[in-house]
Image (cartoon, helix red, strand yellow):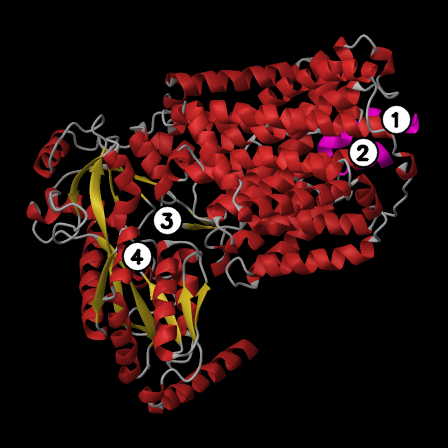
Amino acid sequence: MDLIANLSLGFATALSLQNLLYAFIGCLLGTLIGVLPGIGPVATIAMLLPVTYGLNPTTALIMLAGIFYGAQYGGSTTAILVNLPGESSSVVTAIDGYQMARRGKAGTALFTAGFGSFFAGCIATLVLAAFAPQLAELAFNFGPADYFSLMVLGLVGAIILSSGSILKAICMILLGLLLGLAGTDVNSGLMRFTFGIPALFDGIDFVCVAMGLFGFAEVITNLSHKDKRETFTNKVSGLWPSMADFKRMLPAIFRGTTLGSILGILPGGGAVLSSFAAYTFEKKISAHADEFGKGAIEGVAGPESANNAAAQTSFIPLLTMGIPSNAVMALMVGAMTIHNIQPGPQVMQNNPELFWGLIASMWVGNLMLVILNLPMLGVWVKLLTIPYRFLYPAILVFCCIGVYSLNSNVANIYITAILSVFGYVLSKLGCEAAPMLLGFVLGPMMEEYFRRALILSQGSYATFFTNPISLSLLVATAILIAVMAFPSIKQKRQEAFQEE
Amino acid sequence: MKLKFASSLLAACSILCAGQSMAQDAGKYPSDSVRIVVPFAAGGVADIFARVIGDHLQKAFGKPFVVENVPGAGSINGIAQVVRAKPDGLTLAVSGPGAIVINPLLRPDQVPYKPLKDIIPVVMFDTVPNVLVINKNKIPVNSVPELIDYLKKNPGKVAYGSAGVGTTQHLAAEWFQQLTGTKMTHVPYPGSSRMITDLIGGQIGLVFDNVPLILPHAQSGKLTMLATASAKRAAFDPNLPAVSEFLPGFESSSWHGFLVPAGTSPEIMKKISDEVKVCMSKPETIKKFADMGAEAVHKSPKEFEEHISKELVLWKDVIEKANLQIK
């Protein structure tokens, strides 16, 4: 049994003292930022990227991954207690979770979220371990044309699934693509859009973009808000749900886990999408449809399991193909590249301890999160009372140190500063920065594969259509666009995101 | 205007300082902690080697040797910093062929220093040979002569990968084509990993690349090494022929060494070079380097300069013939 041998290698790695410690730090940080509204996992991982330089790559990724799924847990806590989704994928949880809290069932809601997430995390870890090797094997057969088509599918998916205006999402992706073009062209070695500035010869650094658009811009945005908080901190009691609650909760957790595991793998998918999808699904099939929006337990169980499952399975395209399916995974690409590991099918062969260690650490991390979250709820809730004026100077200082240490170049701080102003303007205009980041990462890759496919086909565009994998991916893209254009579905999508 | 003035002032200063450091007693070197600028990201081969040697120098000289990573722009950033430093031997640059041989030839407009004029070699401490490796499903040959024959019969049909325009992998393949009168299609990649994945997948048929990345796949039978591109047969597999046995004079190896700003006193350079020599002959250093696919060597300042001059002539010719220069 390869699976068992592999998993035991993974656990041996994940259970080393150092890795356990960093997994714990990651989970703790993740929960922390999940609880604090305004700082999402993307911003946090962006800020912490430079900190991981000194760690070995496995440990670094374990910590960053811990932040990611830790945030999924923490986000639900504030969503339920304060109706403030600490994290975008807990937006849905807030709908019914907060209502449950208002009805005095805050404890039950929190237990449901924690238990659902843990269950989903366990299953998703198994899915990851079972299917990733096969997919990696398949990835060796992926030619440049296939990769290009897969990324087209991913980008189109990202446009459709982004909440808010489609037009804006398209603009953001295009902007990201354009930003990604700066630097040395791989094919000719020519410099593009560098204006003779050496700091731009390698392109705009990913960390600058991520930190500017997310880290700094979020700080600016948060400073311009006045907080108003109504909490149910005092009413957290009776964590253990009743038998009737269990009966309604368990099937929803199963469905959410399945849905999340599948949607996480799709390019463009991930935690946010799957929590929305799970909520819609639960609402549709539930016998208690009328309770949704008023505190239905399925409305918490389904989406919470789905977003955690998806958070983990979204590592599959990254680790097997090297393609990030969402902004957090794009950051992971950055983290791996910093450590000289090119994400892709060879990771599993060249760095098996990293691959399996990361997978095993997810399970370990999930366990830690349950332990961390349920008894320590009170502490997390206290955090909500820290005034922001103490938090943000620290955040800014760490960001600047991080950006500078990228390559000991002050120019990077300027670039980040410019981008953060830009990011603030974007958020004022109601444009999401996430599609832009995805465009920024995928754009140069897409161009590279596009041109490589054409070099190999001697300039014949037919290569994108004669290749079976590429063709089916393009057909899938076309279907996606067609479906999009249908008025009824367009309306549904608007409804789904309206519920925010 | 102000900037110009400031920079000329700076230049004047540095000339003055240069004078001073000439006078510095080599016997007292190093008077202070030494900076080793690595123009690559932390964790790479060059970075690890710099730390291994820095560690030895620190113990031998009793002053800290601090490794600093200044990656980016094809090593231009890092080397340019060292060019501007005082020539007192307290700032060393780690360099491979890219920074001091290939980039100045390939993109002269973007490189703000002249090799051997603004920055000079102190000691070369390793060579990293390339191997010629193919995917047999794509190119059904067993030896270098068979490969040349195959390429002649299929001009332009075989695609070869490189880790980017102007890398040793790229130039080795260009030179190979020029010497054999064959024609292949160049497919550049940003780095080696993806290139090797594509070679295994059969998207491309052939590459010249460093041994460590290739070896596991060659052992598993997915890839076939035809020959080593080092001058002589390599230590890791004496049964593997060298390309030079079929194409006399052919050699494509990467290497690493220390550079210092021009004007550094020869005594100081000799002192560094001699101590690196001690380090490179230690069995544990040799093993550490071998583990990373490199061979520990030692070339004195003079030998190293000859090596660079030779490569400058060779690659200039290859780059001109293939019309690769980037304006």
- For the residues labelled 2 and 1, the Cα–Cα distance comes to 14 Å
Q: Earlier in the sequence, mark 2 or mark 1?
A: 2
Judging by the rendered image, the residue that carries numbered circle 1 is: A105
Magenta stretch: give its range.
Answer: A78-105
Viewer-closest of A270 and A100: A100
Could you tell which of marks 1 and 3 lies nearer the N-terminus?
1
**Above or below, A116 relative to B47:** above
Q: Residue at x 32, y 37 (%)?
A: B196
Does A79 appear in magenta? Answer: yes
Q: Inspect the image, locate mark 2, and give the three-letter code of the amino acid beneath it.
A: Ala
Res B264 → quadrant: bottom left
Q: Which residue is mark 3?
A: A189
Alpha carbon of mark 2 to alpha carbon of mark 4: how far? Answer: 53 Å
Q: Which one is closest to the eye, mark 3 or mark 4?
A: 4
Q: Position of residue B269 (x, y in %)?
A: 29, 79
- Describe residue A250's horizontal placement relative to residue B37 as left or right: right
User: Label 2 neighbourhood size at 10 Å, few (<14), some (14-19), many (20+)?
Assistant: many
Q: Position of residue A231 (x, y in %)?
A: 90, 38
The mark tally for this picture is 4
